[in-house]
Image (spheres, rainbow, N blue to C red):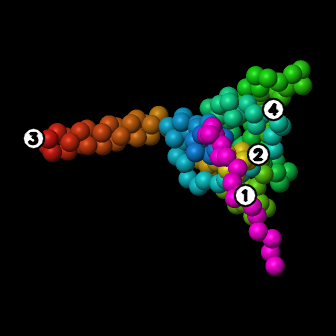
Amino acid sequence: MPRQLSQPTTSSPQKTKPREPVAAGERDAAVNRAAGHNYFLLDKFEAGIALRGTEVKSIREGKANLKDAYGIIKDGEAYLLNAHIGPYSHGNSSNHDSLRTRKLLLHRGELQKLMGKTQLKGLTLIPTRLYFRHGRVKCELAVAKGKQDWDKRETERRREDEREARAAIVRAQHK
């Protein structure tokens, strides 16, 4: 016969402080907004990054910048170059180097696809965003083709036309 408890059980109190949106994966840690302006983004891949502890903490603080970053594939491995992750504010003398080369973690099949695509003339790997997924930092890589100046002007012209059309529709609805 099971023993009966004399006192009712109570569950432990819930956490009152919500998690930081970046750390919870609700918001991107870093976004490369210039990538869409300077490149045609063709295919996107998700890759893990081999990071040090102070780098992860620094990314949680929002000190990552992907503006000049790019990816390369060398000796069958992918690397992220020129991604700036600022020093951790509470770090000590063994803090990380902010512009070091970081290894990207991809499956072998994804690496072979990327190798085949980047060997074509004019295609490169551009990181578009850093974000957290299940507590791990992920990098979204895009296979990209560089835009010429006239491509950039055409894109801006098209965006301006769409903006004006939406404004005209809103004005017509309010009359």
Nearer-the-camera pick, 17 or 77: 17
Please state, as top left, top right, bottom left or bottom right, where the C terminus lies in the image: top left
Tell me if mark 4 has few (under 14), some (14-19) or many (20+) residues whose alpha carbon lies within 10 angstroms of its own: many
**Magenta-drawn stretch contains 57:** no
Kindly identify which numbered label has been placed on residue 7. 1
Asked if 51 appears above or below 85 in the picture, the reply is: below
- Residue bounds of the magenta highlight: 1-19
Marker count (numbered): 4
- For the question of whether residue 10 can be seen, the reply is yes
Identify the secondary structure beneath mark 4. Answer: helix
Point out residue 101 in the picture as x, y percentages from the top left corner.
80, 36
Q: Amino acid at mark 2?
A: Ile
Give the spatial CA distance, label 3 vs label 4: 57 Å
From the viewer's perspective, is 27 left or right of 50? left
Kindly identify which numbered label has been placed on residue 175. 3
**Residue pointed to by mark 4:** 54
Q: Earlier in the sequence, mark 4 or mark 2?
A: 2
Disc 4 vs disc 2: which is toward the camera? 4
Q: Earlier in the sequence, mark 1 or mark 4?
A: 1
Nearer-the-camera pick, 159 or 131: 131
